[in-house]
Image (spheres, rainbow, N blue to C red):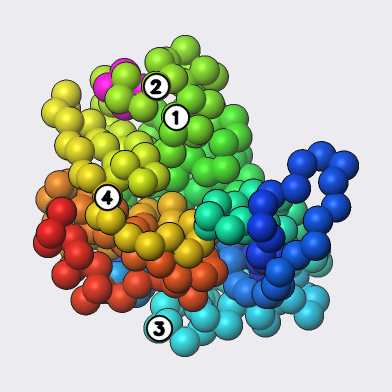
Amino acid sequence: MVVVFGSINVDLVAHVERIPVAGETLAGQSFRCVPGGKGANQALAAARAGAQVALFGAVGRDTFASGAVTNLETSGMDLTGVVAVDAATGIALIHVDARGENAITVVAGANALAAAAQVPDAVLESGTTLLLQLEVPVTELVQLCRRATGARIIVNAAPAVAMPEELLQRIDVLIVNETEAAAVGKAHELPDTPEAFALAAAARYGSVVVVTLGAKGALAVADGDRISIAAPSIHVADTTGAGDAFAGAFAAALDRGSSLHTAMADGVAGGSLACAGHGAQGALPARTAIAALSATL
């Protein structure tokens, strides 16, 4: 089972010709209000990729709360670990430009009150894949990892915020994009270029280190060995949620016992397919589509 402890948001998405710069006001082309949050996105991505999933997190008691979990409620995942708290549901303000690139501002809201204590010891046993991100308090992630001694722990270090050394030492897989690799590298005196970072971090922490490279695919280092998966050629409509699609498909593959190479191919396939549609959750692909594309990589 894939256990996700993470953020649950509503995404307010504006489509624009280009991303505005500081002090600039632009006319948008369209607007949508859709479910999001890295925790929810990755949980749904893993569920659509075929995993049994349980999500733990927090929403507010406001009008956004029901919308935040709409897609999750129909996915078949276990949502008993999602609690309502006295804070606003998390919000992400997203600009998407004509090329499908995005700029995002996240307001944590209820996610700042998500607590490791919500996750019972019974779901942290051997055979569980624990999937984490950095949109909930990092102190809670550390506490959870201290308890999850039997689980496989995957941390997607997104967004690029400070990670304590203890968290890096306790995890089995670290997933970063190029920006996050540079940030983690700088903070922990590691190289800041993707491959050099992956090699150095994997050696220091004894973990698998994955760096996603956007249109260039992804690379991983494990036990000194390097795996590189090129991205397929695909029409990009919206890159929002592509990293979450990668993480969810990757975690689902590892959880069902696939090799690291297969998990990487599934992750790249999932992330690539997600770019062909609009919205973080609406574009998340099903296992059959992931498997078909993954087999060609």
Crowding at mark 4 (Cα within 10 Å: few <14, some 14-19, many 20+) = some
Q: CA distance from mark 4 to mark 1?
A: 19 Å
The nearer-to-camera label among 3 and 4 is: 4
Q: Residue at x 17, y 30 (%)?
A: 226
The nearer-to-camera label among 2 and 3 is: 2
N-term-proximal mark, 1 vs 3? 3
Q: Residue 92: x, y in percent?
A: 69, 59
Q: Nearer the viewer, residue 29 or 14?
A: 29
Q: Are marks 3 and 4 in contact (CB under 8 Å)?
A: no
Residue highlighted by disc 4? 231
Residue farthest to the bottom? 74
**Quadrant in which the C terminus is drawn:** bottom left
Q: Are marks 2 and 1 in contact (CB under 8 Å)?
A: yes
Q: Residue 252: x, y in percent?
A: 28, 62
Q: Which of the numbered marks, if any, corresponds to residue 181?
A: 1
Q: Secondary structure at mark 4?
A: loop
N-term-proximal mark, 2 vs 1? 1
Specify whether 157 is left or right of 154.
right
Secondary structure mostly seen in magenta is helix
Crowding at mark 3 (Cα within 10 Å: few <14, some 14-19, many 20+) = some
Residue highlighted by disc 2? 193
Q: CA distance from mark 1 to mark 3?
A: 34 Å
Residue highlighted by disc 3? 76
Q: Secondary structure at mark 3?
A: loop
N-term-proximal mark, 2 vs 4? 2
Q: Secondary structure at mark 2?
A: loop
Specify whether 293 is left or right of 33.
left
Quick check: can you spot residue 125?
A: no
Q: Are marks 1 and 3 in contact (CB under 8 Å)?
A: no
